[in-house]
Amino acid sequence: MYDNPAAPLAAGGTGSVLAYTGFGSIWLALAAFALIAVGTALLRIVPRKQG
């Protein structure tokens, strides 16, 4: 596996091919989760008005 340079080519070319293998909804769900996590983290950091 590590000594054969042709193994990545046989597996699909490059590592970026993984995004185009039909798992688009998984990437969208992961991006949505990350954006929601960033938004909630920012809401915890930003000070709020009291009163």
Image (cartoon, rainbow, N blue to C red):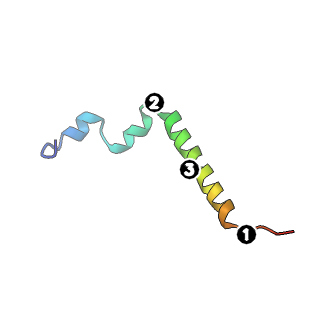
Within 10 angstroms of label 3, few (less than 14), some, or many (20 or more) residues?
Answer: few
**Amino acid type of disc 3?**
Ala
In front: mark 2 or mark 1?
A: 1
Q: Is residue 10 above or below residue 14?
A: above
Closest to the observer, 40 or 18: 40
Q: Secondary structure at mark 3?
A: helix
Lateral position of residue 29 relative to residue 46, left or right: left
Q: Residue at x 20, y 38 (%)?
A: 7
Residue 35 locus on image (x, y percent):
60, 51
Name the residue: 55% across, 39% down: 29
Quarter holding residue 15: top left
Distance between the Cα atoms at labels 3 and 2?
Answer: 20 Å
Identify residue for label 3: 34
Residue type of the residue flagged with mark 1: Pro
Query: Is 38 placed left or right of 16 in the picture?
Result: right
User: Relative to 5, is 37 on the left or the right?
Assistant: right
Q: Which mark is residue 23?
A: none
Q: Which residue is mark 2?
A: 22
- For the residues labelled 3 and 2, say whether their Cβ atoms are less than 8 Å apart: no
Residue identifier under label 1: 47
Q: Residue at x 45, y 30 (%)?
A: 22
Q: Which quadrant would the N terminus be assigned to in this image?
A: top left
Amino acid type indicated by mark 2: Gly
Which of the image's four quarters has the C terminus?
bottom right
Q: Of the residues under marks 3 and 2, which one precedes in the sequence?
A: 2
